[in-house]
Amino acid sequence: MPLITRRAFATQASAAALVALGGVSAAWSLPAAGRPTVTMHKDPSCGCCTGWARHLERAGFTVRSVDSADMIAVKARLGVPEPLQSCHTAEVAGYVVEGHVPVSAIERLLAEAPNATGLAAPGMPIGSPGMEGGPPEVYEVVLFGAGGPRLYGRFRGSAPV
């Protein structure tokens, strides 16, 4: 059994306690190299999509941006229901992420790996990642797929409420 320093032990124990208490998601502890690449489909003229991509990149994700003049076709191909649609549509590890979903919800999705198509933050909620600039409103993130849509979390800005 390899020996570790007290400092290394304390750091690992603290991180494990935060994950266990829900303070940090298990996926957050993955190094950037261990995170899947996010492929974001967006309209070429969209600016908020770039802001959302920066939100993911700050958390260690690599985001590949694909401009598409026909986002309706992209959403249809990936199975995003019309009432859940937003501006950009992303793919990550076999899931679809629609709109301004915060990184913490994506990390939870990847850690839990539910049987679902993906997550959506319908519309363009003010204060959500990529939509900063006004007083943040509370918005919902929805898990969707074969079982129908269900609430996955409520957020203000990028923080759960």
Image (cartoon, grey):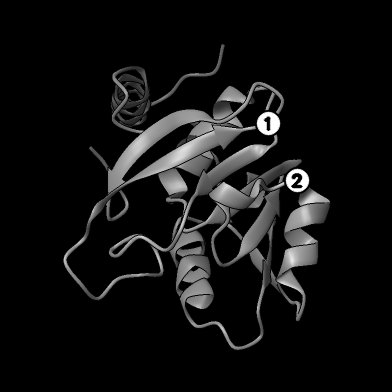
Q: Along the line of sight, which residue is nearer the eye, 6 or 22?
A: 22
Q: Earlier in the sequence, mark 1 or mark 2?
A: 2
- On the image, the x and y values in percent for residue 48 come to 46, 76
Residue indicated by mark 1 = 145
| Secondary structure category for the residue under label 2 | loop
Q: Is residue 34 above or below residue 10?
A: below
Q: Is residue 80 above or below residue 123?
A: above
As drawn, the label of residue 56 is none
Q: Quadrant of the N terminus?
A: top right
Left of 43 or right of it: where is 31? left
Q: Along the line of sight, which residue is nearer the eye, 117 or 103?
A: 117
Q: Residue furthest front?
A: 83
Q: What's the amino acid at mark 1?
A: Gly
- On the image, the x and y values in percent for residue 77 come to 83, 53
Left of 27 or right of it: where is 116? right
| Pointers 1 and 2 in contact (C-beta within 8 Å) | yes
| Secondary structure category for the residue under label 1 | loop
Mark 1 neighbour density, 10 Å: few (under 14) some (14–19) many (20 or more):
some
Left of 19 or right of it: where is 81? right
Residue indicated by mark 2 = 79
For marks 1 and 2, give the CA distance.
Answer: 8 Å
Left of 28 or right of it: where is 71? right
